[in-house]
Structure formats: structure tokens, C-alpha cells
Image (cartoon, rainbow, N blue to C red):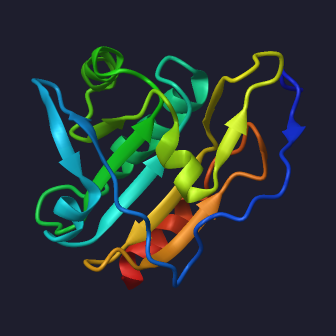
Amino acid sequence: MPDFDVVELPETDHVAEGDTAPDFTRPLVNEEYWEDASLSELTDEGPVLLVFYPMDGAFPATYIWNEIRDRAWGGDGSDLTVVGLSISDPYAHKQLVEERGMDYRLFSDPQNGVAEEYGIVNDLDGMAGVSEPRPAVFLLDGDRTVEYAWVAAEWPEFPDYDEVERALESA
């Protein structure tokens, strides 16, 4: 039995397969530095797996990024770019990348505006005006068309990593 409550999240009208994913520009962080970058800059280079997750330091972030790292998505020889997005600031992202030994870059979106555009906001109970993105995964092609979409329906919930991997293989 988990030490936390599993909460059903309200239905949402999120970006879905076949939709064009909204473009955005935010600080993109790696282990050394960050700079403003747009999603379209990444999709211009090939397919992108965009992974939304709650703030760095929360246990879902650890589980999600450990699994992605262990599966080596977007690794050597792949034209796939795997990139994350959360409400954490660039300093916290740098720390997460270092602590988890990740070769992935992370967008910083403290105001959660990108999650709003994607329809995946999770309003945090008991904190007026504070939200984070629901865990979500979007596989985008070079035109930002959504080839695969998964969005959490309860808290906490994690993607079916095998299902995501099948979507990556068929893309």
C-alpha cells in the first residue's frame, strides 16, 4: 500500500495524436549551461519526445528520468531528441541532470504556461494559484505533429514505458 493517496484528476482537453503541438520558447538546460530555445528548433532536427513532469526533487521526476535514462532513449545513433519540461528553475534542472547522470536537456517553465497551452495543468491542492504539469509524454515529428500522446489521469501516474517504446520504434 502506498504511503500517499492516489487522486483521480479531472478530465482535460489536452493536445492529442494528430494535433500540431504548440510551439514555445523557454530556457533549455543541460549539465553546463542554459539558453532560450524553441521547441520548433528541436523538431527541425528530427523527432522529439517531449516529457512533462512535476518539479525536480519530487519522486515522480526521479522515477520518470531514471526509467528514460536506463532505457537510453535518444541515445547514440538515434535521431530522436528527448527533452523534459517542468516548473523547476534552471538551477534545479542543472542539479537534477547532474544527480541523475542524465544526457537530456530540460525546459524550465516556472509559470507553467506551456502546460496550459498543452491542456495538462495540475492545480496543486491547498495552494491557490500554484500548478504544475501533469506527467505527460508527446512524441512529435519534424512538423510538431503529435504521433503519440499520453497524459496522466490520476496522481501519481507514470507512462507505460513499453508502450512509449513501441511508439518510438514505429515512428
Residue 130 position (above or below residue 107): above
Which residue occupies 59% across, 74% down? Answer: 16
Image quadrant assignment for residue 119: bottom right
**Left of 161 or right of it: where is 21?**
left
Q: Nearer the viewer, residue 170 or 151?
A: 151
Query: How far across and down, in percent of the image, does residue 120 sit?
Result: 64, 51
Q: Nearer the viewer, residue 87 or 104?
A: 87
Residue 33 position (above or below residue 48): above
Residue 168 position (above or below residue 137): below
Which residue occupies 35% across, 74% down? Answer: 144
Which residue occupies 16% across, 25% down? Answer: 31
**Left of 128 or right of it: where is 17?**
left
Image quadrant assignment for residue 97: top left
**Left of 101 or right of it: where is 53?**
right
Query: How many numbered marks appear?
Result: 0
Query: How far across and down, in percent of the image, does residue 139 sit?
Result: 42, 68
Q: Quadrant of the N terminus?
A: top right
Query: Can residue 72 be seen here?
Result: no
Query: How far across and down, in percent of the image, does residue 135 sit?
Result: 60, 45
**Left of 74 or right of it: where is 69?**
right
Query: How far across and down, in percent of the image, does residue 73 sit?
Result: 31, 56
Q: Quadrant of the C terminus?
A: bottom left
Query: Can residue 42 be seen here?
Result: yes
